[in-house]
Image (cartoon, helix red, strand yellow):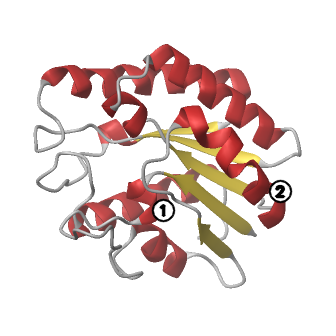
């Protein structure tokens, strides 16, 4: 079984303490932690990209998805769309297009709504926090229309760093634990 994780800097594992865009070590990132807990013979590929938006995802990830040919694609995008001021309904439409294109070839999709933002260096007001919450509801509807699994990380109380956006090391651990539970319940209960 092959899993491809596509997303933004929180999937990539960006360490916001770094001035040059460094990543947390593999064993800190949620993708690395999740990889360690998968059954033998399973693979997990981290295709996260700093700054990625749902609006650019289909163009940016289409070739990678075809190349890797995963059985399951875990998608978590939308934070950067909110941060740069894209309309959340248009963001949800872009996500719908992405999911449709992934599922056309018989792949499974787990759509993850990003965690709530918190006040910090990158988040100056409640407006962006509320937009993430609203985007989560739009993503829930999008997953329903596409008959794919959905997980709402807004409900997970993920620990974030000083910027109000990026996962702390503890946040990566929390996220990996919650996502492992979703996978165990929804996809592979006999294997995990």
Image quadrant containing the C terminus: bottom right
Q: Are marks 2 and 1 in contact (CB under 8 Å)?
A: no
* Mark 1 residue element: helix
- Name the secondary structure under disc 2: helix
Looking at the picture, how far across and down is residue 57, in whole percent?
61, 42
Q: CA distance from mark 2 to mark 1?
A: 25 Å
Mark 1 closeness class: few <14, some 14–19, many ≥20 residues within 10 Å: some
View extreme (right): residue:
105
Which of label 2 and label 1 is nearer to you? 2
Q: Nearer the viewer, residue 29 or 90?
A: 90
Q: Percent x, y for residue 34? A: 48, 71
Residue under label 1: 180
Residue 173: quadrant of the picture: bottom left
Q: Which residue is mark 2?
A: 66
Q: Is residue 189 visible?
A: no
What residue is shown at x 23% (from left), y 38% (from top)? 117
């Amino acid at each position: 079984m092959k899993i491809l994780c596509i997303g933004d800097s929180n999937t990539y594992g960006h360490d916001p303490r770094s001035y040059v865009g460094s990543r947390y070590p593999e064993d800190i990132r949620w993708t690395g932690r999740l990889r360690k807990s998968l059954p033998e013979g399973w693979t997990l590929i981290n295709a996260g990209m700093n700054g990625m938006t749902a609006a650019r995802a289909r163009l940016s990830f289409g070739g990678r998805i075809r190349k890797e040919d995963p059985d399951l694609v875990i998608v978590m995008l939308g934070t950067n769309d909110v941060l740069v001021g894209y309309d959340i309904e248009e963001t949800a439409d872009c996500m719908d297009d992405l999911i449709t294109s992934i599922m056309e070839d018989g792949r499974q999709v787990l759509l993850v709504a990003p965690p709530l933002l918190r006040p910090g260096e990158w988040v100056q007001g409640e407006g962006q926090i509320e937009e993430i919450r609203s985007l989560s509801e739009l993503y829930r509807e999008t997953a329903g229309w596409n008959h794919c699994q959905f997980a709402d990380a807004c409900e997970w109380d993920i620990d974030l760093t000083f910027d109000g956006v990026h996962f702390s090391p503890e946040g990566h651990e929390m996220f990996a634990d919650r996502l492992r539970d979703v996978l165990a319940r929804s996809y592979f209960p006999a294997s995990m």
